[in-house]
Amino acid sequence: MPDPRVHTWSKLESDSPMPLIDRQRIVGAQAMISRVVLHKGFEIGTHQHENEQMAVVLSGKVTFGIGEKDTPGYREVTLVAGQVLELPGNVPHSARAHEETLILDVFAPPSEATGIDKQKKEPGA
């Protein structure tokens, strides 16, 4: 059994996998948590991943597109501080930050590449 560990956000490395986003991650055996700062104007196109995702909005305002744009099932939800979006695995989604927004993203199972990383590696995808 692994030993419990304490992590301090201010001491963790940060990366910027796309313009207008800063991210820190803690990757465990069964889940991953990311502290994400979306700067005003950040957008990520529709993508999906096998991971279940919970986006906990701590501050700011962000709109998520759920489903494939221009299809009958597509809808948009705007979240502010105190709200959580629960995304089952393989649900297509996009996001747009209206202002600087701080989110804790929880993914299960963990993975090295999320939708943001795949967008970075596959331009135009």
Image (spheres, rainbow, N blue to C red):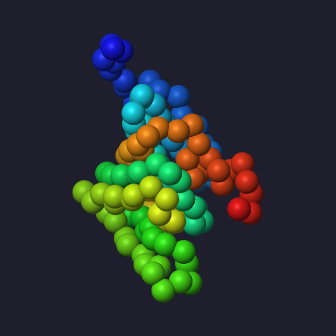
Residue 83 screen position, x and y as percent: 27, 60
Using residue 82 as the reference point, say whether residue 42 is left or right of it.
right
Residue 2 screen position, x and y as percent: 36, 15
With respect to residue 121, does 64 lie above or below? below
With respect to residue 73, does 1 lie above or below? above
Q: Quadrant of the C terminus?
A: bottom right
Q: Is residue 57 visible?
A: no
In the image, 8 versus 65, the foreground residue is 65
Residue 114 screen position, x and y as percent: 55, 47
Q: Residue at x 49, y 72 (%)?
A: 67
With respect to residue 115, does 78 lie above or below? below
Using residue 13 as the reference point, say whether residue 84 is left or right of it.
left
Q: Residue at x 48, y 86 (%)?
A: 72
Q: Residue at x 57, y 61 (%)?
A: 47
Q: Quadrant of the N terminus?
A: top left
Residue at the extreme right: 123
Residue at the extreme left: 82
Residue 65 screen position, x and y as percent: 47, 71
